Amino acid sequence: MPLFFSFLYLLMNIVASLPKDHKFYVSTTTLDFKEASASIQITSQFFIDDIEMLLREFHEEIQLAPDSDKTKVDVLFEGVLKQYFRIQIDNQDQDFNYLGREYKNEILQCYFELNVPESAQILRVQNSMLFSLFEEQQNILHFKSKEGRKSALLYKGKEHEVFSLY
């Protein structure tokens, strides 16, 4: 299994170094369950040009890396995240806190966090980011907890995955 994650890391770095007209449509999201603080720390990675294309559906003048308007980009991006990335705990919708974003080469990396209610058991993650733009889009989820690490591949038609918190 560690070989699989090494391969994914290598793949993301190779893909990140490709020219802007990339042929891979993939994102990765890591959900790290911190039992001691009853929270899930979330990091997502997307190609900058893909997110820029998505945001332009809402505002034609938006530009990323460098940002045309940092505040406007943050507001639009947070709204898009909340539309396409949803989390349920024990069948209850949860609201996450958007913490920010940064650019690394051709990748937009964003951070958000979710508080986990006491006695929560089941985590359901929906990530349909970019499915409306690219038929080939795949979103990889990595869920980490003290029980170990589990991964899932999401795509159009399979837009969510369920994980056990304990």
Image (spheres, grey):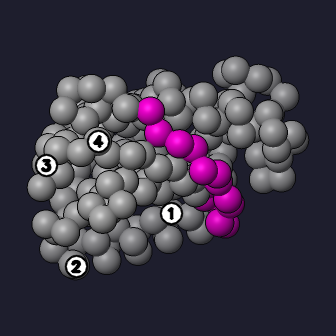
Magenta segment, prevailing SS (helix, strand or loop): strand
Three-letter code, disc 1: Val
Residue 111 against residue 134 in the figure, above or below: below
Quadrant (top left, top right, bottom left, bottom right) of the N terminus:
bottom left
Furthest residue in direction top, as rendered:
58
**Does residue 31 show up?**
no
Quadrant (top left, top right, bottom left, bottom right) of the C terminus:
bottom left
Question: Is 97 colored magenta in this rendering?
Answer: yes
Q: Which residue is mark 4?
A: 117
Cα separation between marks 4 and 2: 34 Å
Question: What residue range appears in magenta?
Answer: 95-108
Circle 1 sits in a helix, a strand or a loop, which is it?
Answer: helix
Picture coordinates of residue 127 (x, y %)? 37, 36
Cα separation between marks 3 and 1: 31 Å
**First in residue order: circle 4 vs circle 3:** 4
Q: Which residue is mark 1?
A: 15
Circle 2 sits in a helix, a strand or a loop, which is it?
Answer: helix
**First in residue order: circle 4 vs circle 2:** 2
Cα separation between marks 4 and 3: 14 Å
Residue 3 is marked as 2
